[in-house]
Amino acid sequence: MLTNYLKLTLRSLYKNRVFVLINVIGLGTALACCIVAYLNWEYNQKFDTNHVHADEIYRVNFYRVTNGYPVANGSCPLPLGDAIRGSVPQIDQVIRYYPASGNFRVNNEVFATSIGGVDPEFFDAFTFEMVAGDASALTDKSSILISTELQQRHFPDNPDPVGEVLTYVSGDERKDYRIAGVFAKPPQNNSFSNLAYVHYDNVLDINGLDGDEWEYFNSTFVRIPDPGGVAAVETALQAYVAVQNENKPDYKVDRYYLDPFAGMAVRSEKEGVWNHWFNQSLPSAAASAPGIMAILILLIACFNFTNTSIAIANRRIREIGVRKVLGSSKGQLVTQFLGENLLLTVLAMLAGLGIAAFLVPAYSAMWSFLDIELNLFGNPQLLMFLGGLLVFTALVAGSYPALYVSSFQPTAIFRGNVRFSGTNTLTRILLTLQFAISLIAIVCGVVFAQNAQYQQEYDMGFDLDHVVFAYVTDESGFNKMRNAIEGYDGIQEISGSQHNVTSSWYTDPIKVGTTEMDVDLLDIGAGYLSTIGAQIVEGRDFRDGSVTDAERSVIVNEEVVRQFGWDEPIGQRIVLRDTVALNVVGVVQDIYIEGALWDPLQPMLMRYALPADYRFIAVRAAAADVPAVKARMETAWAQVFPDALSNVRVMDQERAETLEVNANIKILFLFLGAVAVLLSMIGLFSLVSLNLAKRMKEIGVRKILGASLGHLSLRMSREFIWVLSIASVIGAAAGYFLANMLMASIWAYYVTISPVIIAASIAILFVIGGLTIGSRVLRAATVNPASVLRDD
């Protein structure tokens, strides 16, 4: 019996091999997209699962009421860790963390790297694979633990560099660290990205802190083996709210809480936790959007499969009738057809795995923050997903054709009462849904392509491509760099600042009357705004060397004016941190200080920094001269700071990651849109071909009776034109809402979906659909009637 079923299956597949091949490739492509989407989602869900004790660890966070709303902060005051160490019985370990970066020297090589200052218990609580040395050596403040990435980069011939010396370089300061161990680089979906770790006290020393300042913050983790003790620990933490608020009255804590380390990265991204100093998970839209599009594409492929199966079923009607007369039950026939469909789905899955072998690494390479791979034997969850996807696809794509065809009665078949063309009501509905989904994909592709251009051309409030800057540590470094480059022909302006619009600022509360809000602040020198191309729209800039401006003056952005509803902003009084009274002397055009449009524009204040506080040097040049100016500054840096790596950058480089993300999102949605359209075109091609094959004799008779080519073409394609028209209405509405929802979840500011974009998307659908239908209809309409009627 089984052998007979197999023979029938193979014979049927061979007779319809063209349409089988179309279905296998189409369904395989859709399955490959689903595999990529699943691995993308799984990457996010597995964040930090490499840490064995993740379920026992919590970060000490606090809520602060900001502009009337509670805002979560992923940090706490420096002394809090020591205060609760040993005093709260439910806590097994307290681990403090402070991020830093710096230049290190190995022999004559200087390199920059990120380092983390941690308590020695860090490597006991969190899971790091040690490949050399011993993590417990971190109790020695002269020790450093490095990753295999640093070991391979700077000690390529020494897999066990324990005992080697790294020298920390900061200006004239030097500090030697002995390598005490090497840890394997953790997976990328892991919170900790530091390439080296030193004792926590060392990083405090680097930043000039002694650890007792309640106004400064770190990240503090606690390990609580018994989950039942979490509530008691949170209660104990509330005792320090008053202490914190007394020491920093301008930044008051509402309450402390414990944030479970398991899932912390995903929650921090979703909830917008401030001061989350660790690796971010994928943005919610980046984790879910590929999955949504992959499901839509899979539905298109399944509809293709169903339509084609129903359309070619007429070739097997007599086979079904004979088998029923000979005693086959409906269940046996359903089993036969479901088995055939399952075999096709298995072939499609194999094709999908082959396609995914190329798509997965290509997709992973698009994103610097993503690392996924197709590992069938090392990922049991992926195998379970593939099994479920296989069953789901086989049932969705093949169950209806099997039930539909097996339901015919033998008497009706042999009397000739069972006659259906290549299309029927169900196939038309499915085809309409296919094209509606395709139009959704087209709309998304067009919209995201337009948005990438919109983001690139958006006015950020300053000149990104005219400014070169560098972090020079202090006033001495600023003066040395300025003296080294001053007078160079390409340089138009030079200015200094304590902060920089794309890389350095801070947040503090301000009060106007009884209204309080948090604002972003930058301390800048006179002429800095002119250097970066920011426009003062009202009032004036700071006066060079003015002590009065340093003490009492402030420049605000337009958003502050809007927030407070000022008609005359100049002269308005602002109280900073409850103590410092400032007068508004100028209003600057809104500046997006992060160089990206992910988040809404924030109110911003700028204070005057005297040269003694300068940390950055900014240089303005014509766009054409920027490369030469940057090269000149690099040369000057090597002379002024011979022991430090150059950090000279063009301001536009700070936006490079944003533009890369925008470009990749555009590529992703254009690709998914193209796949969706291609699959729909394949389905339309198959259905039109099968439909016309059933009507060739009708076409021949009409031609003999004098029907024109235009009349025949219109008659044969009319139902498909209606399908495209109805699909356009459904797809345009759904595409508008989906694209708008996805963009709103990614950006605060994005392109408006205009009627032109919708019309252009519909036009693309009709052009491609019209060419597909027209090519098949025209070929059928021009066939010689004698060739199709001679058998009759």
Image (cartoon, helix red, strand yellow):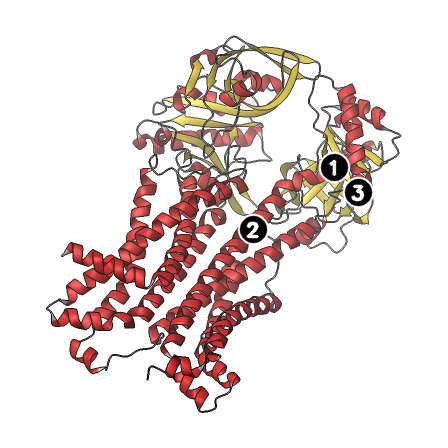
Which badge, 1 or 3, comes first in the chain's sequence?
1
10 Å crowding of disc 3: few (<14), some (14-19), many (20+)? some
At x 36%, y 83%, the residue is 790
Which badge, 3 or 2, comes first in the chain's sequence?
3
10 Å crowding of disc 1: few (<14), some (14-19), many (20+)? many
Under tag 3, what secondary structure? helix
At x 40%, y 41%, the residue is 45
> Separation of disc 1 and disc 2 at Cα?
42 Å
| Percent of width and height locating residue 714 | 49, 82
Q: Which residue is mark 3?
A: 623
| Percent of width and height locating residue 406 | 21, 69
Q: Is 6 on the left or on the right of 466, as rendered?
A: left
Under tag 2, what secondary structure? helix
Relative depth, front residue between 751 and 407: 407
Find residue 667 and name its label.
Answer: 2
Q: Which quadrant, please, contains the N terminus?
A: bottom left
Name the kind of residue labelled 1 in the image.
Arg
| Percent of width and height locating residue 450 | 62, 57
State whether residue 137 appears in this view: yes
> Separation of disc 3 and disc 2 at Cα?
28 Å
Q: Which quadrant, please, contains the C terminus?
A: bottom left
Q: Mark 3–mark 2 contact, CB under 8 Å?
A: no
Relative depth, front residue between 242 and 607: 607
User: Which label lies toward us, 1 or 3?
Assistant: 3
Which badge, 1 or 2, comes first in the chain's sequence?
1
Relative depth, front residue between 51 and 776: 776
| Percent of width and height locating residue 128 | 42, 23
At x 81%, y 24%, the residue is 479
Q: Which residue is mark 1?
A: 607
Q: Mark 1–mark 3 contact, CB under 8 Å?
A: no
Name the kind of residue labelled 2 in the image.
Ile
